[in-house]
Image: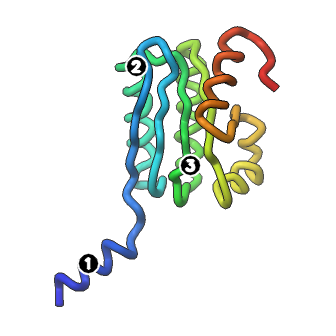
């Protein structure tokens, strides 16, 4: 009976946070976020992504949130902190893949006006290149 309960809990509980990284070394780092971003893991997400940017000597960050099922307000804070940190290091950040409830939350909070946003990682990379060159990407 205990095994059955544990199995049910694992299927009905929050989706664990997973991060995948690609790129860097003079090019933008693509950080793909999957699962739920909440109070328990938002700071860890921020630290892990910032560390990957430094370790891979990334020239900007593409933060792909297309795999995010839920994001608490502390997740928005983590994104803003990443944006500030990258700005201090003369890098840029583009958020891509936001859909549904996440996109609506970004709009309702006004964060869609504070963040550079794109639909796809390819579009995000183009926007980063424009911002690095000092051009107006809009």
| Cβ atoms at labels 3 and 2 below 8 Å apart | no
Q: Give the image location of residue 26, x and y in percent.
A: 47, 12
Determine which quarter of the picture holds residue 128: top right
Label located before the other in sequence (1 or 2)? 1
- Left/right placement of residue 121 relative to residue 57 reads right
Q: Which residue is under mark 3?
A: 66
Few, some or many residues within 10 Å of mark 1 (<14, 14–19, 20+): few
Label located before the other in sequence (3 or 2)? 2
Few, some or many residues within 10 Å of mark 3 (<14, 14–19, 20+): many
Q: Which residue is under mark 1?
A: 7
User: Which secondary structure lies at badge 2?
Assistant: helix
- Left/right placement of residue 45 relative to residue 125 reads left
At 38% across and 27% down in the image, what residue appears? 52
At 39% across and 39% down in the image, what residue appears? 20
Q: Which residue is under mark 2?
A: 54
CA–CA distance in space, label 3 to label 1: 27 Å
Please tell me whether residue 66 is drawn above or below residue 115 in the rendered image: below
Determine which quarter of the picture holds residue 96: top right
Q: Give the image location of residue 118, x and y in percent.
A: 69, 37
Q: Quadrant of the image for the C terminus? A: top right
């Amino acid at each position: 009976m205990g095994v059955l309960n544990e199995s049910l809990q694992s299927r009905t509980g929050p989706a664990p946070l997973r991060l995948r990284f690609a790129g860097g070394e003079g090019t933008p780092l693509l950080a793909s976020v999957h699962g739920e971003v909440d109070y328990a893991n938002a700071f860890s997400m921020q630290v892990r992504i910032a560390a990957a940017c430094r370790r891979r000597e990334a020239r900007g960050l593409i933060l792909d949130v297309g795999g995010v099922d839920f994001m608490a307000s502390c997740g928005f804070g983590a994104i803003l902190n990443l944006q500030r940190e990258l700005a201090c290091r003369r890098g840029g950040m583009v958020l891509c893949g936001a859909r549904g409830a996440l996109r609506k939350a970004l709009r309702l909070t006004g964060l869609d006006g504070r963040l550079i946003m794109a639909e796809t990682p390819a579009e995000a990379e183009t926007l980063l290149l424009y911002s690095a060159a000092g051009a107006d990407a809009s």
